[in-house]
Image: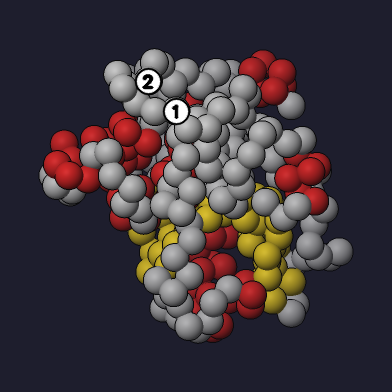
Amino acid sequence: MDERAAAAGCEQVDWGGSEPGERIIMKKTKALSNNVHVGLPSPLPDPVNCSLIKGDYRYFHYGCDGQDDRGWGCGYRTVQTMASWLCCNWTPQQNKTRSPPSLQEIQQALVTMGDKPASFSGSREWIGTFEASLVLDYFYDVPCKLVHIRGGGAELEHVAVQELHQHFEKQGSPVMMGGDRDNSSKGILGVCTGDKGSYLLVVDPHYCGCQLENTELQRRGWVAWKRVSSLDQSSFYNLCMPQTAKQE
């Protein structure tokens, strides 16, 4: 999988050197896994509609760069996964690409933009879909569509599912999803709809440990199809959708 992604133009992630005096708590993952959803069976034998991510990406998760961000870094990791897709698949107007930003770079960018105070840099404060949209625009000049989904099964099954189908069919990029009661960030890589409801293809950034084979990540549920009805029905949700399609 790594070799195929490299052949397709994925750049190796270069984190650079650590800051002076920075304590590395965890070992950096030697190589990030690519396209971790590939080979996962469809959740429905005969879906009415199934829309998936297009192109290559890398799976970022807790501790993958040696920084222990357990409990607060899930939003950052989802942003990095989204950024890796941009590195592999999207050609900016300036015809230049850059590696996914580090956690420190993400925090500093938000401070530089004036969205966060100076004390945010180096903190363990989490970020959500709004901050994700700012970061992707800052580093890649990619605007994002933000969609607010009120709590309740009808809104999730209809509004969210319809928005996701349209996004993957037109844009093809990963989506970030977060909420209030369900405040765990998650990446969405696809949506599958049948007669009795829909499923989301979720890549979970909360895994922490050494690199696993894609089949093992799937077996353990770190990338999996989740029924929309299994989401917290009392939580609202926000979607951050990178807009990368060329304008007609």
- Give the x, y percent position of residue 109: 24, 36
- Dot 1: what SS? loop
Residue 16 horizontal side relative to residue 63, left or right: left
Give the quarter of the figure containing the N terminus.
Answer: top right
Give the quarter of the figure containing the C terminus.
Answer: top left
**Residue shown at 44% from the left, 21% from the top:** 15
Tell me the CA gap for discs 1 and 2.
8 Å
**Residue shown at 48% from the left, 32% from the top:** 25
- Give the x, y percent position of residue 2: 69, 23
Label 2 sits on residue: 18
Residue 65, numbered label: none
- Give the x, y percent position of residue 106: 32, 37
Residue 8 horizontal side relative to residue 166, left or right: right
Label 1 sits on residue: 24
List the single residue furthest toward the right.
45
Q: Amino acid at mark 1?
A: Ile
Residue 190 horizontal side relative to residue 77, left or right: right
Mark nearer the viewer, 1 or 2: 1
- Give the x, y percent position of residue 17: 39, 16
Colouring style: secondary structure
44 is higher (above) or lower (below) than 107: below
- Dot 2: what SS? loop
Q: Is residue 77 visible?
A: yes
162 is higher (above) or lower (below) than 241: below
167 is higher (above) or lower (below) than 46: above
108 is higher (above) or lower (below) than 124: above
Q: Determine the image quadrant of residue 50.
A: bottom right
Tags 1 and 2 in contact by the CB under 8 Å rule? yes
**Residue shown at 62% from the left, 22% from the top:** 30
